[in-house]
Amino acid sequence: MKAIRAAKPEQLPLDLRHDAATGRDDLVISDPVSAAASIIDRWPDWASPVVIITGPEGSGKSHLANVWRRKSGATTVRPIAGSGAIEAAGLGPVLIEDADREGFDETELFHLINAVRSAGTSLLITARSWPLAWGVSLPDLVSRLKAATTVEIGAPDDMLLSQILVKLFADRQLQVDDKLVAYIVSRMERSLAAAQTIVQRLDTMALSRGTRISRALAAEVMGALAQREDD
């Protein structure tokens, strides 16, 4: 059954927040994310005290990080001078998200990793790219990052994209049929970020028009996104 809303005049929808389900049981497991999910599940039995999970935007890094933070009781830190990150690392597990996007002080990160190793705690880092692409110049930090366990989340396959779409719709309390999901997957950009954008636009457009989320509406949304990319 397609998602149906009561018919009403077109209106501008309110910008309501839709909270995604981010628990371990809500994590969609497919080949691209299985290795990273396995690492999270194995904590604290990690081969290295430092684990780095890399992957493109929207690939599930933040979901995995949130699962691990809840499981380990980790403190989210940013390795810059005066932030207290090193002190936190000496007390328990710590988490750094989007390291290559948010930036870090190389010396501070080096000492933070040392604090983790000395205290016998754990550090999880998420990033879009592998550590060797971060432009690190401090030799000792390069050595520490090479010693970390690095796991990459691969490009999403059709199964994962389908499951993610269903989950994103469910987060908005919407149900869509399998044929519509397959139609979207066969025509969308191969990224989880694209899935998030498509679902958000479909929900917003259907709400504003007082109509259901249909194949025609999906074609309109994806056509508009393709046109934007071409401009």
Image: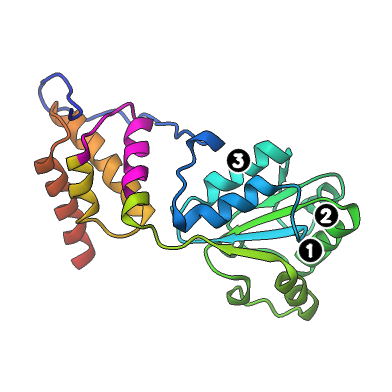
Q: Residue at x 75, y 60 (%)?
A: 47
State whether the magenta stretch is mostly helix, strand or loop. helix
- Which span of residues is magenta-colored? 161-178
Secondary structure found at label 2: helix
Q: Nearer the viewer, residue 32 or 169?
A: 32
Amino acid under disc 1: Glu
109 over 90 or under it: above or below: below
Earlier along the polypeptide chain: callout 3 or callout 2?
Answer: 3
In the foreground, 104 or 56: 56
The image's mark for residue 86 is: 2
Say few, some or many: other residues with alpha carbon within 10 Å of mark 3 (under 14 / 14 to 19 / 20 or more).
many
Residue 108, label in figure: 1
Q: Could you say which quadrant of the image residue 218 lies in?
A: top left
Q: Are marks 2 and 1 in contact (CB under 8 Å)?
A: yes
N-terminal of the pair, mark 1 or mark 3, is 3
Q: In the image, residue 18 lies at what x, y percent? A: 40, 31
Considering the image in quadrants, where does the C terminus appear? bottom left
Mark 1 neighbour class, 10 Å CA radius: few under 14, some 14 to 19, many 20 or more = many
x then y, percent, for residue 122: 77, 52
Considering every residue shown, the one lying at the far right of the view is 118
Q: Which residue is mark 3?
A: 67
Q: Secondary structure at mark 3?
A: helix
Q: Amino acid at mark 3?
A: Val
Res. 64 in view? yes
Q: Nearer the viewer, residue 42 or 49?
A: 42
**Residue 188's disc number:** none
